[in-house]
Amino acid sequence: MQNWKYHFYYTSIVDEGLGCGTSVEWIWKKHKDQQSPAMDDIQKIGTDGWELISVTPISTMAGNAGQTREILFTFKKPID
């Protein structure tokens, strides 16, 4: 039976310039606290042999209830 290791990547999609707005386009832009845009990081994870197995939206219950604010990407890779 194959054994797997898992990697999780979490990113915000909050449009900081508009205050409370969100947009998936934000994963292609560099945020003030990031070294690079999230999509660059996600693509690097893929080229390192990780397989994307799920994308989970994370919503807030405060203010704009039900609005997706973050995204959790889950990857897996066989254990050598």
Image: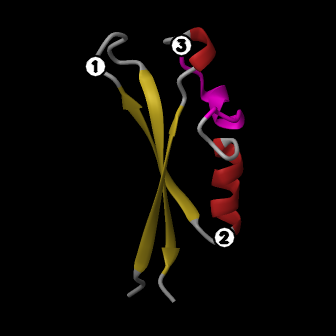
Q: In this view, does 79 lie above or below 50?
A: below
**66 is higher (above) or lower (below) than 71:** above
**Horizontal and vertical percent position of residue 60:** 33, 23
Helix, strand or loop at label 3? It is: loop
Residue at image position (64%, 29%) is: 26
Q: Nearer the viewer, residue 73 or 16?
A: 16
Mark closer to the chain start, 3 or 1? 3
The part of the image, by quadrant, that contains residue 27 is top right
Quarter of image, res 61: top left
The part of the chain drawn in magenta is 21-32
User: Where does label 2 land, which residue?
Assistant: 48
Q: Do the residues labelled 3 and 1 touch (CB within 8 Å)?
A: no
Task: Identify the residue under disc 3.
Answer: 21
Task: Indicate the amino acid at tag 2.
Answer: Asp
In what element is the residue under mark 2?
A: loop
- Residue 79 is left or right of residue 64, and the answer is right
| Vertical order, 41 against 68 (above or below) | below
- Ranked by sequence position, the earlier of labels 1 and 2 is 2
The residue lying toward the viewer, choosing from 49 and 70, is 70
